[in-house]
Amino acid sequence: MTPFDLALSFVLLEETGGDPDGGYNDRSSDRGGPTKYGISQRAHPKLDIKNLTREHALEIYRAEYWMPAKCDSLPAAVAVAQFDFAFNSGEDTASKHLQRMVGAFPDGDLGPKTLAALQSFMGGRGASTTAVQFIVARGRYLSNLVDEPEKPRERQNLKNIEGWVVRLIRLTAYVTQIN
């Protein structure tokens, strides 16, 4: 499997619950509106979500998350962690957190300097261990989103934290199996 295929396997399972038809839902509690294959109406207002095909969803994943997050430039395990973070929190947020972790300037551009910093950071650790450290950094980011529960957005985030933590635990188990 390619790193993109590995990342898709994880994200699609998380986003669809294993439903081969894409896990379509239109719950009023979901701020994203109708969602299928994890692709929301809110993020794609002109897209017919209910009739979204798997193939079109994969094109969106590659064009809007995998490529902008420069996942092709990363070791497989780190790429999977970067892709999942980018999909859930945005490419810029994911990239800046990866840059901070490896000691690169957090400008959101995973260029040659960041990739060199990543290689130096990895040292003898390996990609899976580095990916786990990145997932821990993501956990800190998510916990900061619920720091002020008296604010409306943070109250909503507080409702989501359990699901986020479970996802990070599953992602950790997943990336440790990637060579």
Image: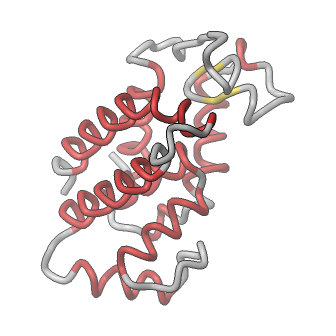
In this orientation, which residue lies closer to the viewer: 174 or 52?
A: 174
* Image quadrant occupied by the N terminus: top left
Q: Is residue 14 left or right of residue 55?
A: left
- Residue 154 in the image: state x and y as whole percent: 55, 39
Number of numbered tags placed on the structure image = 0
Q: Is residue 47 left or right of residue 153?
A: right
Q: Residue at left 16%, top 47%?
A: 177
Q: Residue at left 67%, top 25%?
A: 31
- Residue 142 in the image: state x and y as whole percent: 43, 48
Quadrant of the rendered image containing residue 115? bottom left
Q: Residue at left 59%, top 42%?
A: 61
In this orientation, which residue lies closer to the viewer: 158 or 73?
A: 158
Height in image: 152 above or below 83? above
- Residue 27 in the image: state x and y as whole percent: 62, 10
Q: Is residue 11 left or right of residue 34?
A: left
Quadrant of the rendered image containing residue 53? top right
Q: Residue at left 61%, top 63%?
A: 92
Height in image: 127 above or below 22? below
Question: Residue lying furthest front in this view?
Answer: 150
Height in image: 9 above or below 113? above
Q: What color scheme is it?
A: secondary structure
- Residue 71 in the image: state x and y as whole percent: 48, 61
Question: Residue lying furthest right in this view?
Answer: 46
Height in image: 138 above or below 126? above
Q: Is residue 5 left or right of residue 67?
A: left
* Image quadrant occupied by the C terminus: bottom left
Quadrant of the rendered image containing residue 107? bottom right
